Image (cartoon, rainbow, N blue to C red):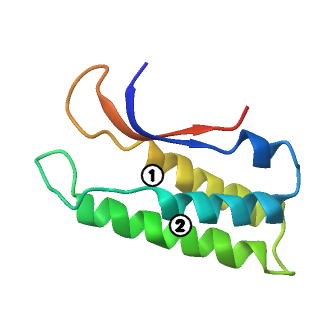
Amino acid sequence: MAHWVNKMDIADLWSKGDFRKISFGISTRLREIVIPHTQNEYYDGFYLDSQRQDLAEQFGALSGDDDADVDDFDYLMCDLYDWADTPLDNEWIGQKLCWIKTF
């Protein structure tokens, strides 16, 4: 298993089953994650932090959007998982950006 630099536990939110409440909680928790603004040959901290901020804003907006549906939530979750799974080095079982715990 990879070595996760950050961890975001949303199991308590996930168990509520309401995608708007989950979205609000994810938005809040994403804002708490600190991404160092460093660069190396494998990742750009500025870019990853910008993506984190964008995701937080999108989840926040989704939580208050009466026209949103579960498909919109699923789309954002795919983006979140892609961001979180970013490798931070070139090792076989190396560092990844963020573990998302849902269960």
Determine which of the numbered discs, if any, sits on residue 23 in the image. none
Going by the numbered disc 1, the residue's amino acid type is: Trp
Q: Quadrant of residue 47?
A: bottom left
Which residue is painted at 85% across and 42% down in the image? 15
Rendering coords of residue 24 (x, y %): 72, 66
Residue 49 vs 4, above or below: the answer is below
Q: State the quadrant of the C terminus.
A: top right
User: 10 Å neighbourhood of mark 2: few (<14), some, or many (≥20)?
Assistant: many
The residue located at (72%, 73%) in the rendering is 62
- Which corner quadrant holds the N terminus? top left
Whether the residues at callouts 2 and 1 have beta carbons within 8 Å, the answer is yes
Query: Which residue is identified by label 1?
Result: 83
Label 1 crowding class (10 Å Cα cut-off): few <14, some 14-19, many 20+? some
Q: Position of residue 80 (x, y in %)?
A: 55, 53
Give the SS element for disc 2. Answer: helix
Label 2 vs label 1: CA separation?
A: 9 Å
Residue that mark 2 sits on: 55
Is 55 on the left or on the right of 67, as rendered? left
Residue at position x 60%, y 51% in the image: 78
Task: Check disc 2 and give the amino acid type.
Answer: Leu
Residue 38 sits above or below residue 4 on the image: below
Residue that extends furthest to the left in the rendered view of this protein: 41
Q: Position of residue 13 (x, y in %)?
A: 77, 49
Image mark count: 2
* Rendered location of residue 60, percent (x, y): 66, 73
Disc 1 is placed on an element classified as helix
Q: Where is residue 11, by image quadrant?
A: top right
Q: In which image quadrant can residue 86 be found?
A: top left
Q: Name the side, left or right, on which 67 lies relative to 26.
A: right
